[in-house]
Amino acid sequence: MFGLTRDIGIDLGTASILVYVRGRGIVLREPSVVAMDKNTGRLLKVGSEAQKMLGRTPGNIVAIRPMREGVISDYDMTERMLREFIRKVVPFRLLKPRVVICVPSGITEVEERAVIDAGIQAGARKVYLIEEPVAAAVGAGIDINRPEGHLVVDIGGGTTDIAVISLGGVVESESIKVAGDKFDEAIIKYIRRKHNVLIGERTAEELKLAIGCVYQKPEEEVVEVKGRCLMTGLPRVFQISATEMIEAFEEPATQILEAVHSVLERTPPELVADISSNGIVMTGGGSLLWGFDKLIESHTGIETAVAEDAISCVAFGTGSSLENLSHMQDGTVNLSRRRQLKL
Ligand SMILES: Nc1ncnc2c1ncn2[C@@H]1O[C@H](COP(=O)(O)OP(=O)(O)O)[C@@H](O)[C@H]1O
Ligand SMILES: [Mg+2]
């Protein structure tokens, strides 16, 4: 083992980064956040330690999420963050690791290059890209190599990726910038409008995790929230119910439903028939929002289930792809759809 570097797979998510080391499994899970000193440009913290600083930094320190909306919005920071994480899992640097990184299916060539360059700069010997929905499907336990259609809905922090997969590739897909973050924003907006109170992003996410839902729960739930009253400017405590959450989430939930619908509309009929018997599989942290499976099922009439360990599916799928590295091409997205288009 000495001097031998293991291949690694990275789920470069907008909310969290998961790193899979071949032969060892998922070894790192950290929020995609970096904190740096604005004056010196020095990187102070990455991951969970940087997350604690979000929204609480003094003037010279900034804590940011460099991967907002599924692509690299801050290239320099993404590269540094990747470097720190790769360093953490590959302590011996005699031989640089080969790295597989997951990217959203709708990624442009410019964005692709940015991910590859960030990987190389961060210390990878070679970077291979695979499509997130394909990795999600594999991680959810679907045998993607059969000539049979499957529909995967991956709801992350920044993007929702919806894809029909058959014969190991993406047949039809859509990636929209509506996911977990938009649900947090929707809570903030709703509370401002209905209760005249301002709450922060972290409180909004906590509320979402505590009572958030997109479908009527069998029993009503109510929690207390603290915020700043917009009338008086002073702190105020008030109550909010799960039913109000459904109202707050109406817009982003509808946008996701419409995207699922439009992917189904564009899918060849044979594959739609497969999907209606195989069911829809949901992955990603956002799919854990209570009732999302029921909502999609009620709108499509297709049985829908959240995959086991939904947050880790993409990382597990990326990990499996490490076994096939010799068949993959580095420096490009290993995806059938684009190859088919070029033919
Ligand atoms: N139990 C839960 N209920 C609702 N949303 C959740 C839950 N757990 C995580 N999330 C949301 O999932 C999103 C992150 O999902 P993840 O798959 O890690 O995203 P990404 O792939 O973009 O990094 C965040 O918006 C987070 O608030
Ligand atoms: Mg993801």
Image (cartoon, helix red, strand yellow):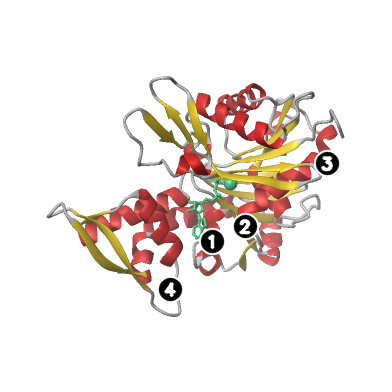
Q: CA distance from mark 4 to mark 1?
A: 15 Å
User: Is there any visible trace of residue 168 in the rendered image?
Assistant: no
Q: Earlier in the sequence, mark 1 or mark 3?
A: 1
Q: What is the distance, in whole Å, between disc 4 and disc 3 at their CAs?
A: 43 Å
Left or right of residue 137, residue 75 in this image:
left
Question: What residue does disc 3 label?
Answer: 323
Label 2 residue SS: helix
Residue type pointed to by label 1: Leu
Which amino acid type is marked by label 4?
Gln
Whichever of labels 4 and 3 marks the residue nearer the N terminus, that label is 4
Residue position marked by numbered label 1 in the rendering? 288
Ligand 1 has an atom within 8 Å of the beta carbon of the residue at disc 1: yes
Comes first in the chain, label 3 or label 2: 2
Q: Secondary structure at mark 1?
A: helix
Going from N to C along the chain, the mark reached first, 4 or 2, is 4
**Which of the numbered marks, if any, corresponds to residue 216?**
4
Asked whether the residues under the numbered discs 3 and 2 touch, taking CB atoms below 8 Å apart as contact, a structural biologist would say no
Callout 3 environment at 10 Å: few (<14), some (14 to 19), or many (20+)?
few
Asked which secondary structure carries label 3, the reply is helix
Q: Position of residue 152 (x, y in %)?
A: 63, 54
Of 59 and 272, the residue lying toward us: 59
- Alpha carbon of mark 4 to alpha carbon of mark 2: how far? 22 Å
Residue at the (35%, 54%) spot, across then down:
186
Q: Within 8 Å of ligand 1, the CB of disc 2?
A: yes
